[in-house]
């Protein structure tokens, strides 16, 4: 069984829907929180590889196949895509052939020779069709998702295939390894009509790893030339948007009315969704990667796409001065395209509604179309759920509501009393245990907590002097332990209360009571000192506060005495 060109490293895939969001054709199935690529739906654009923050999406490596090919004793030639000049730029470009020969390759050619050849054939008057076919992702997309446009494809093969045939025509005993930035080239080499042309496809990421494994550093390699079997000209610009038109000498800037070059999945798909627009152009050059092949998924570089573009242009200008030699005659360039349309199961409105009911979105106001699940709308997500491509748990608002419901359930069933206050210390929520403990009901919602219990701890939280408060209090003949804390971001305060009236205290609990008693006594003493100093001014307030503190101590020990008597 053939393995997927792009696959998921499940150990690194962690409940992130970035790949689903970035996938233009939604070829990713989420099951059990794992995002798996569905090969029959995938067009091998490799966007998920570039977008995955955990690097869980990987282009399958073919390094071992290339090594085995060389180890077999067969002569092996390289066809390297013109975008190499953006990765191995400046002086490194001239050292690249030597580095590749150190790996065991016999000869090193530029795929730009094949690009020049197929450009001439694509733009020949005898060739019918509108859409250029150098990009295998565009071809795959049309075959799978826009088969009605197959007749608009120019029936000319890609530069890679044409160049592979050129090399094998000249050197029939040689195997050919293609190196480039594109994952889809691995799939293209396996098409039946291309059988035996390209033996192995490597990405630039793979060749760099191979250099590292063999401890080959380009800066230490000598400069050497590429072998040459064809004309190149401006075809080294092929990896750039509009590069094919430039190679063919076709004027294609924004003022051109009869030709169009376009790059990027969104723009390409928008164009292909508009047949009436397609018919306005005699030739269209589409590249699925934004900015062209210099932005392919097998192209790891610290440079941005604009810097890479400048590298390509600089290399093209410099290489033009090199003498072209040893050209080859005509080779087979004609190809066919097949209808491989993806037939998705029909999803009914009733099925969509059932998904909405399950996720709490039956009411249209809860259908937020937030896109957090990776789909553009709640309807698209629901369809994916019905088709088995997505899970209801991918809906973030739904999961948040579930979490809130579970939280509410925990609070409601807690044997401890729980109360939540707003920033004015008014009650906004209290659970049944709290209501039972303090003999109240929801009729007190909105009233200040001080109406029910001693609010000193909450007052301190409100003042910002503390973030957490713990004490033992007595009210309504009940001794209770309170833990209070602040939710600053929400501007709320939470109290958790445990009835300890019938609990036999251990040493640690008695220590808490004693510590609190000492604190109360100290408060009492400090107040009395202050009272003595300003008797006249504070007489009324001191008397009231002193009585309150004294009564609190009496109640506390009275309750302890009752417990002892009961024992």
Image (cartoon, helix red, strand yellow):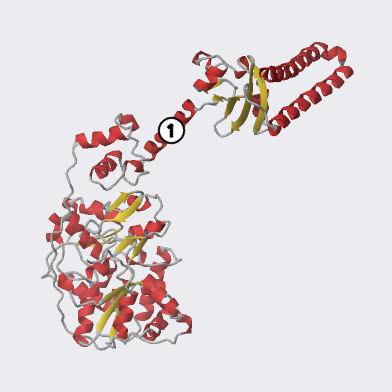
Most extreme residue toward the front is 567
Residue 390 % position (x, y): 29, 46
**Rendered view: 374 above or below 210:** above
Which quadrant does the N terminus fall into? bottom left
215 horizontally vs 270: left or right: right
Q: Quadrant of residue 354?
A: top left
| Near-viewer residue (485 or 489) | 485
Number of marks in picture: 1
Q: Quadrant of residue 11?
A: bottom left
Residue at horizontal 27 percent and vertical 51 percent from the top: 26
Which quadrant does the C terminus fall into? top right
Q: Callout 1: few (<14), some (14-19), or many (20+) C-alpha neighbours within 10 Å?
A: few
Describe the element under mark 1 as helix, strand or loop.
helix
Q: Say whether residue 231 is visible.
A: no
Q: Quadrant of residue 53?
A: bottom left
Most extreme residue toward the top is 540
| Near-viewer residue (429 or 208) | 429
**Rendered view: 144 above or below 218:** above
Residue 475 % position (x, y): 64, 16
| Near-viewer residue (412 or 74) | 412
Residue 545 % position (x, y): 76, 16
**Rendered view: 502 above or below 48:** above
Residue 240 % position (x, y): 32, 67
Q: Say whether residue 543 is visible.
A: yes
Residue at horizontal 15 percent and vertical 81 percent from the top: 330
Q: Which residue is mark 1?
A: 406
Residue at horizontal 59 percent and vertical 33 percent from the top: 488
């Amino acid at each position: 069984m053939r393995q997927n060109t792009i696959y998921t490293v499940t150990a690194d895939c962690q409940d992130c829907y970035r790949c689903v969001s970035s996938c233009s054709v939604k070829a990713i199935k989420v099951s059990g929180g794992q995002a798996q690529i569905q090969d029959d739906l995938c067009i091998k654009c490799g966007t998920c590889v570039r977008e995955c923050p955990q690097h869980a999406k990987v282009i399958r490596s073919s390094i071992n196949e290339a090594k085995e090919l060389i180890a077999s004793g067969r002569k092996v030639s390289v066809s390297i895509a013109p975008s190499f000049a953006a990765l191995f730029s400046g002086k490194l470009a001239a050292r690249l052939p030597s580095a590749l020969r150190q790996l065991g390759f016999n000869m090193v050619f530029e795929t730009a020779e094949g690009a020049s050849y197929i450009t001439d054939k694509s733009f020949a008057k005898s060739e019918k069709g509108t859409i250029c076919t150098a990009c295998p992702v565009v071809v795959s997309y049309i075959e799978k998702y826009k088969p009605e446009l197959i007749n608009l494809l120019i029936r000319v093969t890609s530069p890679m295939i044409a160049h592979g045939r050129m090399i094998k025509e000249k050197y029939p005993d040689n195997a050919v390894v293609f190196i480039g930035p594109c994952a889809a080239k691995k799939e293209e080499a396996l098409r039946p009509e291309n059988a035996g042309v390209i033996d192995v496809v490597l990405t630039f990421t793979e060749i760099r790893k191979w250099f590292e494994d063999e401890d080959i550093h380009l800066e230490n390699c000598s400069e050497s030339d590429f072998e040459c079997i064809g004309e190149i000209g401006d075809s080294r610009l092929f990896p750039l948007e509009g590069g094919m038109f430039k190679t063919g000498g076709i004027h294609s800037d924004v003022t051109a009315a009869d030709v169009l070059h376009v790059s990027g999945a969104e723009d390409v798909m928008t164009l292909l969704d508009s047949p009436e627009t397609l018919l306005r152009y005699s030739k269209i050059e589409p590249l699925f990667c934004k900015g062209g092949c210099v932005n392919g998924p097998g192209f790891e570089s610290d440079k941005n796409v604009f810097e890479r573009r400048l590298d390509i242009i600089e290399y093209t200008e410099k290489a033009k001065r090199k003498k072209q030699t040893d050209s080859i005659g005509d080779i087979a360039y004609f190809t066919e395209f097949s209808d491989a349309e993806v037939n998705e199961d029909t999803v009914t409105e009733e099925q969509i509604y059932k998904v909405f009911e399950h996720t709490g979105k039956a009411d249209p106001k809860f259908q937020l179309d937030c896109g957090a699940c990776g789909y553009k709308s709640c309807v698209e997500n629901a369809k994916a759920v019905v088709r088995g491509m997505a899970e209801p748990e991918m809906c973030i608002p739904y999961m948040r509501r579930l979490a809130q419901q579970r939280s509410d359930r925990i609070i409601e069933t807690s044997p401890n009393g729980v109360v939540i206050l707003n920033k004015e210390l008014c009650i906004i929520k209290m659970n049944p245990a709290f209501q039972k403990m303090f003999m109240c009901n929801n009729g007190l919602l909105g009233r200040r907590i001080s109406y029910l219990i001693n609010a000193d701890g909450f007052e301190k939280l409100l003042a910002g002097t503390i973030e957490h408060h713990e004490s033992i209090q007595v009210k309504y003949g009940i001794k209770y332990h309170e833990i209070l804390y602040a939710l600053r971001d929400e501007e709320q305060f939470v109290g958790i209360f445990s009835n300890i009236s019938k609990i036999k205290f251990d040493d640690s609990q008695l220590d808490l009571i004693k510590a609190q008693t000492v604190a109360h006594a100290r408060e009492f003493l400090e107040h009395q000192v202050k009272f003595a100093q300003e008797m006249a001014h504070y007489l009324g307030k001191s008397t009231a506060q002193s009585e309150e503190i004294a009564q609190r101590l009496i109640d506390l020990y009275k309750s302890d005495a009752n417990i002892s008597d009961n024992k």
